Image: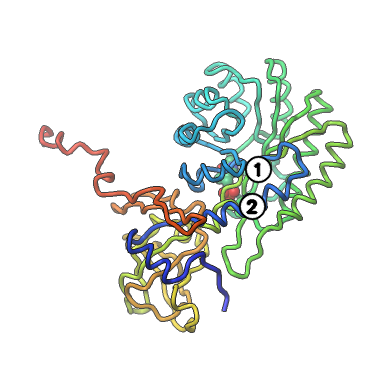
């Protein structure tokens, strides 16, 4: 039977549920730290290597504090995410702003924090210059167009809204140099949830070639290359994780051939991964509320797509474990649903599981990135709590569950009395 491991036993999770009612997300601190170290070690040959955690994947300051302690920076793309970075105590080159369609106040806050600003468009050079003034360091996002095939979530680069064209980015460096900018970076991101290790080596090659070209055409020595996010995770038990050591070795070879051989080293390598950093180490814990048998069998949970949208949104596979029933046969076929008045509110369709009954605990895997954070309040559904399973086995609540009061907080019911119809 294809299976995935859990960092807790049935008895342990039952104990946690005594204090924290389902549904909730729980993150495994030990596994997050071990993975962070593995990733850093894989690229330790590159001096200045840094991973900027794409905070949109799980915007929780407690998780960010753990990752910061492991030496990670933060990748932000909104005012709220920059504010979160600030409240965690981050500043300067610990922060990267990679946003698009960016408002002036976001550039301003990034500049005030000393963050690295990554421009998405050639028109943003003038926009930043006029509205907040250009900082000494600027990065630009490259869209390689038809040099690169896209993947399912992002699509073909030519159709993507992100980044500068090849011609624009060369011109961009010339303009920025003329305006007195001193330090330069380059960024690209053309994939999401990609499991093909070679894909990331090819992406590095495209960037390294461009870095050589920029040096030849403008004399600028680019100081850092941000290879973006997009490393996938093995959602299915049979999927294979990206081999970071293989990716690192492939990139190192290209670094020697293109960057060192052309005399433009050192070049610092950055990533801004979200999914690959926390995705596999977060779990949505939920209970079966009802079993319904009509033309099909439905297991209705106390969680819904508010807690994890990916299956409903992309038809994404998320593995489901039933603690205590690991050794029972997968004899029943269920649509595993939430309670939204939306028929696509399903965590799985036609999934073979052990026979379920109300109050069974279900654990939905790989919810540690783009899980809780994507949730919404449609249908008056409330977002759940987030818990951190500490290395010593204790549990810390790192976000409380929303209440009805939170849901109505933006409405003025008193004003309703003065509102005549
Ligand atoms: C979403 C995003 C990321 C993180 O993507 P993952 O798939 O979680 O690694 C990184 N950078 C940018 C610009 C993004 O939009």
Image point 49% across, 84% down: which residue?
Answer: 329
User: Which residue in the protein does label 1 denote?
Assistant: 271
Residue picked out by circle 2: 231
Q: How is the image coloured?
A: rainbow
Name the one closer to the observer, 256 or 180: 256
The x and y percentages for residue 375 are: 41, 51
Q: Describe residue 259's horizontal placement relative to residue 344 as left or right.
A: right
Residue in the image at 52% along x and 30% along y: 102
Q: CA distance from mark 1 to mark 2?
A: 10 Å
Residue 272 locus on image (x, y percent): 61, 42
Residue depicted at 57% across the width and 79% down the height = 1
**Residue occupying image coordinates x 71% and y 16%:** 178
- What secondary structure is marked by label 2? loop
- Ligand 1 shows up in which quadrant of the image? top right
Q: Is residue 140 left or right of residue 19?
A: right
In the rendering, at what x and y percent does residue 208 appear?
Answer: 78, 39
Mark 1, other Cα within 10 Å: few <14 / some 14–19 / many ≥20: many
Q: Nearer the viewer, residue 203 or 278?
A: 278
Residue 279 falls in image quadrant: bottom right
Q: Which quadrant of the figure contains the C terminus?
A: top left
Say if mark 1 contacts mark 2, CB within 8 Å. yes
């Amino acid at each position: 039977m294809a299976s995935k491991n859990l960092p807790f036993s049935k008895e342990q999770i039952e104990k946690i549920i005594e204090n924290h009612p389902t549904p909730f997300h729980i993150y495994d601190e030990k596994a997050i730290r071990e993975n962070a170290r593995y990733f850093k070690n894989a690229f330790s040959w590159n001096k200045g290597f840094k991973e900027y955690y794409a905070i949109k994947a799980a915007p929780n300051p407690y998780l960010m504090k753990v990752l910061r302690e492991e030496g990670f920076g933060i990748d932000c793309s909104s005012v709220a995410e920059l504010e979160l970075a600030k409240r965690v105590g981050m500043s300067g080159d610990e922060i990267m702003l990679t946003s698009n369609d960016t408002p002036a106040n976001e550039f301003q806050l990034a500049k005030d924090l000393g963050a690295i600003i990554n421009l998405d468009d050639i028109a943003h050079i003038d926009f930043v210059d006029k509205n907040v003034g250009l900082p000494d360091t600027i990065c630009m996002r490259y869209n390689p167009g038809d040099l690169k095939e896209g993947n399912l979530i992002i699509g073909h680069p030519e159709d993507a809204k992100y980044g500068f064209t090849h011609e624009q980015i060369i011109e961009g460096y010339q303009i920025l140099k003329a305006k007195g900018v001193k330090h330069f970076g380059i960024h690209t991101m053309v994939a999401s949830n990609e499991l093909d290790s070679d894909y990331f080596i090819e992406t590095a090659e495209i960037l390294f070639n461009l870095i050589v070209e920029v040096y030849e055409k403008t004399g600028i020595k680019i100081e850092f290359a941000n290879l973006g996010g997009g490393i996938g995770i093995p959602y299915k038990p049979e999927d294979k994780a990206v081999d970071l050591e293989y990716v690192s070795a492939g990139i190192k070879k290209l670094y020697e051939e293109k960057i060192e051989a052309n005399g433009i080293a050192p070049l610092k390598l950055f990533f801004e991964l979200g999914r690959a950093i926390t995705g596999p180490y977060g779990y949505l814990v939920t209970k079966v509320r009802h079993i319904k048998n009509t033309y099909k069998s439905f297991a209705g949970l106390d969680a819904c797509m508010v807690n994890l949208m990916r299956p409903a949104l992309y038809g994404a596979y998320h593995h489901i474990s039933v603690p205590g029933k690991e050794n029972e046969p997968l004899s029943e076929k269920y649509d595993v649903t939430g309670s939204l008045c939306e028929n696509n509110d399903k965590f799985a369709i036609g999934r073979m599981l052990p026979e379920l009954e109300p109050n069974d605990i279900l654990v939905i895997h790989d919810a540690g990135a783009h899980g809780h954070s994507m949730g919404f309040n449609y249908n008056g559904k409330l977002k759940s709590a987030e818990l951190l399973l500490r290395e010593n086995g204790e549990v810390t609540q790192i976000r409380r569950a929303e209440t009805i009061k939170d849901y109505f907080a933006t409405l003025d019911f008193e004003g309703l009395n003065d509102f005549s119809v």
